Every structure is written in structure tokens, then in C-alpha cells.
Image (spheres, rainbow, N blue to C red):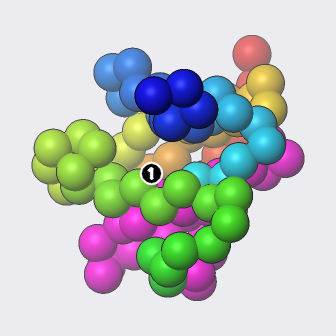
Amino acid sequence: MFGNEEPYTVTGNTITLKDESKQLLLVTTDRYPNILVSKYSVELSDWQPERRPGVKNILLQELFKRDKVFFFIRAGGVEYQVDLKYAENPITEMKF
């Protein structure tokens, strides 16, 4: 099935956006806001997991097979650290 490839990969604790023309909506549990990933940014979002063109909804609990609050996201050549326990500033751009 050509063209049905997922726009992301998962390696260990890192989610990588492969198709930079797409966006990912990482759906968290009710305790935390959802996370919108694009090639330009990774940010908290109030979007609900509805069908939208160019947006892939991903349930974090199904992706990691458990309730995970600490992980990394790589998008647009930048790596972000996400720690949902820090409600004030859970997303940090990593500097290397």
C-alpha cells in the first residue's frame, strides 16, 4: 500500500516526525493537555482528537503501551524534551 506510511517513527522514548508536511496530535490522558507537533514547533494544544486534514491523531498510551509522561520529540531538526509532570513548562527545546 504505497502512500499509507506513518508520518512518524518511535525509537525508545523518542517520537520523530518523518513527514514534515504533516502534523501530529499526541493525545494524552485527561490529566494533561494534548500536544501538537509540526516541523516548526511542539506545543500544548486544546485540540481534541478529531479528524483534520494533514493531522495524525496518536494516543500516547497506545504508542508507548503505558501511561508515559516523560519522552522526547524530534521535529524539524530540533529535539524537544517533554515532561508532563511540570505543568508550568512541560516542553523544553534541547540544546546540544
Identify which amino acid the numbered label 1 is placed on.
Asp
Q: Quadrant of the N terminus?
A: top left
Residue 36 located within the stretch drawn in magenta: yes
Task: Report whether 33 appears left or right of 67.
Answer: right
* Residue located farthest toward the left when viewing the structure as drawn: 66
Position in image of residue 17 (x %, y %) = 62, 34
Residue 84 located within the stretch drawn in magenta: no
Residue at x 33% of width, y 54% of height:
60
Residue at x 84% of width, y 47% of height:
40
**Residue at label 1?**
83
In the depicted view, which residue is nearer to us: 14 or 38?
Answer: 38
Residue at x 69% of width, y 33% of height:
19
When the figure is inspected, residue 64 is found, relative to residue 34, above or below; the finding is: above
Please provide the residue range marked out in magenta. Answer: 25-47
Residue at x 33% of width, y 21% of height:
12
Task: Report whether 1 appears left or right of 28.
Answer: right
Q: Can residue 34 be seen in this view?
A: yes
Position in image of residue 89 (x %, y %) = 61, 63
